[in-house]
């Protein structure tokens, strides 16, 4: 197994720009190239990642897939996911070089786990219009597999339920079925889908907090992400908002909504409004749900197109092979090279 030369060279270039000494720069490429083999030895181990939040809206829900799920337990809503266990330590006698690679692996594994959690929180938001911010949730991690704390996923759950009892009730209503459909439809491991989810979630959060101008700016941000994804996956290049709706198999009225969102973003969000800023909620509040309906269809269209052009497998058989295939994506997504 081999990592791409681009990944190794980009990582080494970042370390050089960050000012690491020559001894680290010399060791780093070799450590990076060892990762596929080192990680393959950990393929039999996985991590159960659990985040719990207050269930203030009293949802009754239980939806599971083989790799993630959500359920309500007493006064909590619990999101869980299964992902890689990449707890490598002391990879090199050079502690600085070793720590850099170990920190990257931690963030890469976190990306996989958080992405699966994000698919669940996004599904709940899309089905129930309820937002749960996993960044501020209680966290539990249990490693399971050979030579681990727990031998199986069931045993790992048993440990978690010692402090967080499961709820045996199942969600069978229409909205629960919608959550299940969205969880299977959204591949939040793909960077475009993940960014689209964030823009939708951010727009909902801003609107609920009475930041209308910022909310429509976030919704137009979803259009921008969709345009980037379309360009990446189909080589169409930049397209106007109305054509964007057509390319994602939406109707003409959705195209007009996307144009309106762009116009509002330009008039109120991207630049200081020339006038009427204090009346934004009164002027456009009646239209906001139609804006969100269009955004929901656009996010679904992005997810469906991603499935047709899939490059990031949401359910890999071996996490070491997944890492090897997606190392460059992970470097762009979780590391610091592209930050200003």
Image (cartoon, rainbow, N blue to C red):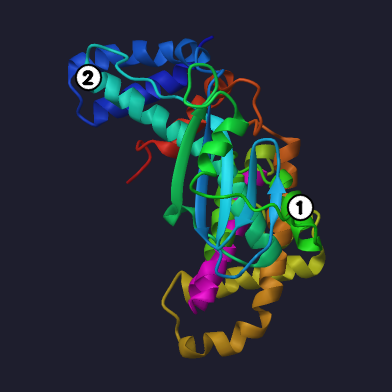
Does the magenta stretch mainly form a helix, a strand or a loop?
A: helix
Q: Residue at x 53, y 17 (%)?
A: 146
SS at mark 1 in the image: loop
In the rendered image, which residue does mark 2 sit on?
A: 95
Taking the image as shown, residue 37 lies to the left or right of residue 340, namely right
Name the image quarter holding the N terminus.
Answer: top right
Res. 97 mark: none
Q: Residue at x 49, y 79 (%)?
A: 210
Asked where in the image residue 173 lies, by quadrant, the reply is bottom right
SS at mark 2 in the image: helix
- In the displayed structure, 102 sits above or below 241; it is above
Residue 204 is one of the magenta-drawn residues: yes
- Residue bounds of the magenta highlight: 203-230
Q: Looking at the image, which is closer to me, 54 or 233? A: 54
How crowded pointer 1 is (Cα within 10 Å; few <14, some 14-19, many 20+) is rated as some
Taking the image as shown, residue 187 lies to the left or right of residue 281, namely right
Q: Position of residue 73 (x, y in %)?
A: 59, 56
Residue 229 is one of the magenta-drawn residues: yes
Asked where in the image residue 44 lies, by quadrant, the reply is top right
**N-terminal-most mark, 2 or 1:** 2
């Amino acid at each position: 197994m081999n990592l791409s030369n681009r990944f190794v060279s980009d990582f080494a270039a970042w370390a050089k720009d960050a000012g690491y000494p020559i001894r680290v720069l010399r060791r780093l490429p070799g450590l990076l190239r060892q990762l596929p083999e080192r990680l393959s030895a950990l393929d039999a181990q996985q991590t159960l990642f659990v985040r719990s939040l207050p269930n203030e809206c009293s949802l009754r829900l239980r939806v599971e897939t083989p790799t993630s799920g959500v359920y309500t337990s007493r006064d909590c809503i619990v999101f869980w996911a299964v992902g890689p266990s990449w707890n490598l330590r002391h990879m090199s006698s050079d502690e600085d070089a070793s720590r850099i690679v170990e920190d990257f692996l931690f963030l890469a594994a976190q990306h996989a786990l958080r992405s699966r959690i994000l698919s669940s929180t996004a599904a709940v938001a899309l089905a129930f219009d309820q937002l749960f911010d996993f960044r501020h949730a209680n966290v539990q991690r249990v490693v399971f597999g050979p030579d681990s704390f727990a031998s199986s996923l069931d045993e790992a759950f048993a440990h978690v339920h010692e402090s967080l009892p499961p709820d045996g009730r199942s969600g069978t209503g229409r909205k629960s079925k919608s959550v299940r459909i969205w969880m299977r439809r959204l591949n939040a491991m793909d960077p475009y889908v993940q960014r689209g989810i964030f823009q939708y979630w951010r727009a909902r959060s801003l609107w609920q907090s009475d930041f209308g101008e910022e909310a429509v700016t976030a919704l137009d941000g979803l259009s921008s992400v969709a345009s980037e994804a379309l360009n990446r996956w189909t080589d169409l290049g930049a397209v106007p908002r109305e054509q964007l709706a057509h390319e994602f198999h939406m109707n003409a009225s959705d195209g007009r909504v996307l144009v309106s969102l762009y116009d509002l973003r330009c008039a109120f969000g991207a630049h200081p409004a020339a006038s009427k800023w204090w009346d934004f909620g009164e002027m456009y509040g009646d239209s906001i749900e139609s804006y969100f309906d269009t955004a929901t269809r656009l996010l679904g269209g992005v997810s469906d197109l991603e499935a047709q052009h899939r490059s990031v497998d949401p359910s890999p058989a071996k996490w070491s092979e997944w890492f090897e295939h997606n190392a460059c994506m992970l470097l762009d997504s979780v590391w610091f090279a592209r930050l200003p």
